[in-house]
Image (cartoon, grey):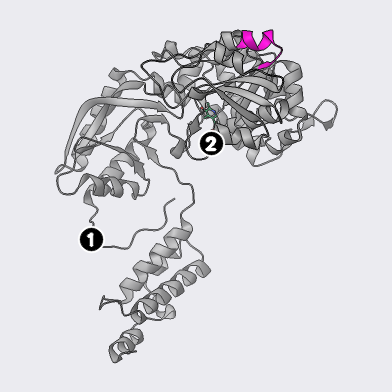
Amino acid sequence: MTPEQQERLRSIPSVADLLNAEAVQRWLEHASRPAVVRALRDAVESVRTRILAGHGDEPFDANTVLLTAEDLLWERLVPPVRRVINATGVVLHTGLGRAPLCEAAIEAISDAAAGYCTLEYDLDSGSRGSRTRKLAELICEVTGAEAATVVNNNAAATLLILNTFARDREVIVSRGQLVEIGGSYRLPSIMTAGGAILREVGTTNRTHLRDYEDAINDRTAMLLRVHTSNFRVTGFVHTTPLEEIVKLAHRVGLLAVDDLGSGALFDLAALGLPGEPYVAESLAAGADLVCFSGDKLLGGPQAGIILGRRELIEGIEANALARCCRVDKLTLLALEATLRHYDDPAEARHAIPTLAMLDLDTDALADRARALCERFQHAVPAEHFFVCSDASYAGGGSLPGRELPTVVVQWRPGRRSVDAVLTALRHTEIPVIARIRDEGICLDPRTIQEDEHDDLVAAVASAAFADDGEATLRVLPPS
Ligand SMILES: *Cc1c(COP(=O)(O)O)cnc(C)c1O
């Protein structure tokens, strides 16, 4: 160790001294004393390590140690999942939690969460009841299905269907429908996990009925149609319609299953979004089982819904794996409250946030964009904001490639790079997730809730003034 290093080590303030710093007193209003002490101790240790490793002559006064300690404390206090403002215009953004819940769902959850509820209790008989029976009845009412069940998500729904009806047997799927849905969901892997044998037929762009027909043999259990929910193949394309797959399956005594993915409960052509398959269509085509997600176009919590013939649904519920995929009380309550809005599709369109956001027309979006633009300009007069047309997306594996016309605020940062501002926006008190177009940052009012406008203006102002180099103590914590 050099004499300089020794000198520098000696000048590191002690944890006891640091505890008296004014900033630390403020931290103690938000964090426990042991947590603050631990952060200070770790910060002192890390500065010591840097000095011993011979790292330059960087200053390491009390403020350096405090900044390090604050970063550590911040990391520990920040919840792993935080609220953000979605300014991307992607309505069902899987990374940002897909569908925001409707008010009725939030109320139902908070009513039940703090106390006990009749999750599996029958008030009439005073004995054990069914967890999903009432919800299943509501689903049948809303969709017209004969029977229904609910599981944790659509991946679980697919797994259960395959495991119940196609274990050690073949499932015929078009090569054009072997989807991967972001991250870990890949149909062939789910097939393997469920114990079914994938029999792919046709080609990437064209699969004909005779391809299915030729592949049928005595080990075949089902024909599976999968909605290609997050991509679109155009050009020389042929997809076998579900009705034809169903007819063929039934002619030879096999099951026809439709993995619908996004699960629109009515024809979204009514929202100016034609072409997205919907549940009643699949049932009308005669599919024996239909499955889809609760948190995509349905606009509810994460869940997987399976519809179909009663004896098939009973078979699924009798599978031991069903117990491993069951929904909790919060999901159940949120889903039920969301589904109640579908009694009246007109009500669903404005009460369910996902549908309401898809439903916004360019006039309404332009009004919001202009109002936001004015507020940004007022908050940060030195920066350049303007309103322009752009495209939003449904996202979350629905309406692939379909652009929804929107009107956004574009911000062309004058002092800093677009990337630096985008990063700064992700690190404001309520993080803002936005996207880049041309040389600017696009903020799409379609996915920005109206009660988030104040927070958004504050975030934009803070990102505009944030300086890249100089670190300052933050105000703890993010709430
Ligand atoms: C989204 C999707 C899934 C997976 O659903 P999760 O609810 O995310 O588990 C499966 N199949 C298709 C076709 C999908 O679009």
Q: Nearer the viewer, residue 440 or 10?
A: 440
Residue 233 lies, in percent from the top left, at 40, 21
Q: What amino acid is labelled 2 in the image?
A: Tyr
Check mark 2 vs ligand 1: CB closer than 8 Å? yes or no: yes
Q: Nearer the viewer, residue 451 or 69?
A: 69
Q: What amino acid is labelled 1 in the image?
A: Gly
In the picture of the structure, the residue carrying the numbered disc 1 is 469
Q: Nearer the viewer, residue 253 or 109?
A: 253
Q: Residue at x 78, y 32 (%)?
A: 121
Q: Is residue 252 magenta?
A: yes
The mark closer to the camera, 2 or 1, is 2
Q: Residue furthest bottom?
A: 3
Residue 318 lies, in percent from the top left, at 78, 29
Residue 226 lies, in percent from the top left, at 54, 22
Drawn side of residue 426 relative to residue 116, left or right:
left
Numbered mark located on residue 129 in the image: none
Q: Is residue 366 magenta?
A: no
Q: Quadrant of the N terminus?
A: bottom left
Q: Quadrant of ligand 1?
A: top right
Drawn side of residue 130 relative to residue 334, left or right:
right
Q: Secondary structure at mark 2?
A: strand
Q: Secondary structure at mark 1?
A: loop
In the picture of the structure, the residue carrying the numbered disc 2 is 185
Q: Which residues are magenta?
A: 246-255
Question: Can residue 267 be seen in this snapshot?
Answer: yes
Which image quadrant is residue 73 in? bottom left
Q: Residue at x 28, y 18 (%)?
A: 363
Question: Can residue 302 be seen in this snapshot?
Answer: no
Drawn side of residue 388 relative to residue 269, left or right:
left
